[in-house]
Image: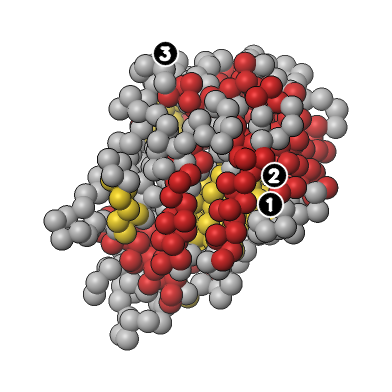
């Protein structure tokens, strides 16, 4: 990708062509269910993903996260890999089903012990721990009580946040309450493509509100626990573009932007749901789940916003009469998602770093000068270990290069971007795709659990050492 027309190589090699701020957090991210395995160890209770993945037909390759990358047992080796890369920060998620005790009374200390050890290992390696409290693995017991459609789940989440803060609050540097509540609500309860696999747009909207309420309550609980780190949330916000300037296509883009971005940003950062989203969805729900005082809780000030970015969306109105009954977006049955011209990753996701720059600038323009982190960005490719033990992944290097360049442009334009986390540290269980998609900087052989640094990991190590992007190619 040379779309940004940036310098590729540097004489001397070490000085960064695109220098980032000296205290910028160069990171990588993972999530508990995708890497830990050990689903029945140390008192862990079942999660909605255990149940969902075990249901035939839900996961492309019929796999589950039962073993995943065995990180629960290999975390020391994985922290050593992070140290080898020179990571400044590592974003992991805490598994609620590990911390919850069956029946919900008390806390499973053995589950917290694992994260205690992980955090200490990170700090010993000079890596700042960034903890996400909810990366989609709701305890199954809570789903049986209604899951995120049950308002009580938000209060249980705040209790859980307090328990984790009580143990890790002195050492975690940045907290993300939730990861991508859009996915939890609209894929989990709307399209059914994610756990728990329910298919009701009304329930999806209810879940979205309760997730936001959970975020606000947890933010309060973290602060009440006198944590030493900052608090934020990671959203899969996106850049939504109309396929043409017709009124119908512009309206499609407005509606998708409302249901992807503003339905979260507005209550979090302005204390109100967007009026157009409420009007658009009036035929689905009366929004009575929003109780007096909720929006004040949801808009409890946060320290930083996390943005997970992969690709922009290109949308337009469907042909008259054509509908997409399986859309995760409530009220979007008459909207078409068009393929973006140009290259795609192994996910079929378009490669367009301009969407990242636009998104960061848009958030600053519309919601103010809030500190931000790119909490996820990365690409899947069908990587293989070669006979000489390397994993050549030039496409991933191109992808990361171009997106870091876009982030650099956003900083130059005034965005207060504090860090960037590659998704992901390791190849892992990619939700509905199982083990068929590899996002890691580190290749994992699932038969042996052998880890091999990909070329992109070597490249990223050099970027980190130089304090900025040095070159696209790993070996110039
Ligand atoms: C994000 C998820 C993450 C991973 C990447 C590819 O939506 O937060 O767990 O699946 O996509």
Tell me what residue is drawn at x 38 percent, y 72 percent.
Answer: 462
Residue 185 image position (x, y, % from top left):
58, 27
Above or below for 401 versus 427 = below
- Determine whether, in the image, residue 468 is placed left or right of residue 215: left
Q: Quadrant of residue 251?
A: top right
Query: Label 3: few (<14), some or many (≥20) within 10 Å?
Result: few
Pointer 2: what residue? Answer: 164
Alpha-carbon span between mark 1 and mark 3:
54 Å
Under circle 1, the secondary element is helix
Under circle 3, the secondary element is loop
On-image quarter of the C terminus: bottom left
Residue 301 image position (x, y, % from top left):
77, 49
Judging depth in this view, the residue of 74 and 474 nearest the camera is 74
- Say if residue 317 shows up in the picture: yes
| Mark 3 CB near ligand 1 (8 Å cut) | no
* Count of numbered marks: 3
Q: State if disc 1 and disc 2 touch (CB < 8 Å).
A: yes
Judging depth in this view, the residue of 365 and 293 nearest the camera is 293
Pointer 1: what residue? Answer: 168
Q: Residue furthest left?
A: 387
């Amino acid at each position: 990708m040379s779309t940004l027309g940036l310098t590729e190589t540097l004489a001397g090699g070490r000085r960064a062509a695109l220098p980032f701020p000296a205290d910028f957090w160069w990171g990588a991210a993972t999530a508990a269910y995708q890497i830990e395995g050990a689903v029945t160890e140390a008192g862990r209770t079942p999660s909605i993903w255990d149940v969902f993945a075990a249901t035939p037909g839900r996961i492309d390759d019929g796999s589950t996260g039962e073993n995943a990358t065995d990180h629960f047992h290999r975390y020391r080796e994985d922290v050593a890999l992070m140290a080898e890369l020179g990571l400044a920060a590592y974003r992991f998620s805490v598994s609620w089903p590990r911390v919850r005790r069956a029946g919900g009374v008390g806390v499973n200390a053995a589950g917290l012990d694992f994260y205690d050890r992980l955090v200490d290992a990170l700090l010993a390696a000079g890596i700042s721990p960034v903890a996400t409290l909810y990366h989609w693995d709701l305890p199954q017991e809570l789903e049986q009580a209604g899951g995120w459609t049950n308002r009580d789940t938000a209060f249980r989440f705040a209790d859980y946040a307090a328990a984790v803060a009580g143990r890790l609050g002195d050492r975690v540097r940045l907290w993300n309450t939730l990861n991508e509540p859009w996915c939890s609500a609209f894929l989990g309860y709307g399209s059914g493509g994610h756990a728990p696999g329910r298919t009701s747009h009304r329930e999806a909207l209810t879940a979205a509100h309760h997730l936001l309420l959970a975020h606000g309550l947890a933010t309060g609980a973290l602060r009440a626990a006198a944590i030493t780190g900052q608090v934020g949330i990671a959203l899969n916000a996106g850049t939504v573009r109309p396929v043409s300037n017709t009124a119908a296509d512009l309206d499609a883009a407005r509606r998708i932007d409302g249901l992807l971005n503003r339905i979260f940003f507005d209550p979090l950062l302005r204390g109100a749901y967007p009026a157009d989203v409420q009007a658009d969805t009036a035929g689905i729900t009366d929004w009575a789940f929003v109780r007096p005082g909720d929006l004040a809780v949801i808009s409890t000030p946060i320290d930083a916003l996390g943005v997970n970015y992969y690709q922009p969306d290109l949308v337009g109105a469907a042909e008259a009469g054509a509908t997409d009954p399986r859309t995760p977006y409530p009220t979007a049955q008459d909207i078409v998602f068009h393929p973006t011209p140009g290259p795609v990753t192994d996910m079929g996701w378009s490669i367009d770093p301009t969407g990242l720059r636009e998104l960061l600038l848009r958030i600053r323009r519309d919601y103010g000068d809030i500190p931000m982190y790119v909490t996820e960005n990365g690409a899947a490719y069908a990587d293989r270990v070669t006979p000489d033990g390397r994993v050549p992944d030039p496409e991933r290097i191109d992808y990361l290069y171009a997106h870091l360049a876009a982030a650099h442009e956003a900083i130059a334009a005034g965005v207060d971007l504090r860090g960037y986390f590659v998704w992901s540290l390791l190849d892992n269980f990619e939700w509905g795709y199982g083990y068929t998609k590899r996002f890691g900087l580190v290749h994992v052989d699932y038969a042996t659990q052998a880890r091999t640094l990909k070329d992109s990991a070597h490249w990223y190590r050099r970027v980190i050492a130089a304090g900025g992007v040095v070159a696209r190619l790993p070996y110039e």
